[in-house]
Amino acid sequence: SFEVELAQSGRTLVVPEDKSILHTVEEAGITVMSSCQEGVCGTCETGVLEGVPDHRDFVLGDEEQAACDVMMICVSRSRGPRLVLDL
Ligand code: FES
């Protein structure tokens, strides 16, 4: 598991191994736009303020993934113990 801090809502959530960031955030009552839930459409693109995403989407190119400033939270996870997202 890892933590996500939501910068706009001032909350920190724990994302378990068996749940996506998207579902974890939605369960906390925060509305996020999403569609495919499979990392292909780009709807759930979310700004990353701190931390290194483990990109698992098919939307971002190599350079965009390396920049670590956005991620698809329906499938991508965290390389480290904590991410700060622009949510
Ligand atoms: Fe389609 Fe996340 S909902 S990429």
Image (cartoon, helix red, strand yellow):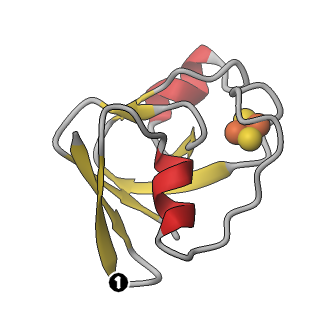
Taking the image in four quarters, ligand 1 sits in the one at: top right
In the displayed structure, would residue 48 be above or below residue 63? below
Which amino acid type is marked by label 1?
Gly
Disc 1 target residue: 10
Q: Position of residue 15 (x, y in %)?
A: 32, 48
Q: Position of residue 44 (x, y in %)?
A: 70, 49
In the displayed structure, would residue 75 be above or below residue 11? above
- Disc 1 element: loop
The N terminus lies in quadrant: top left
In the displayed structure, would residue 66 be above or below residue 21? above
Q: Position of residue 53 (x, y in %)?
A: 39, 35
Residue drawn 26% across the image and 29% down it: 79
Residue drawn 66% across the image and 72% down it: 31
Residue drawn 49% across the image and 62% down it: 25
In the drawing, does residue 54 fall left or right of residue 39? left
The part of the image, by quadrant, that contains residue 7 is: bottom left
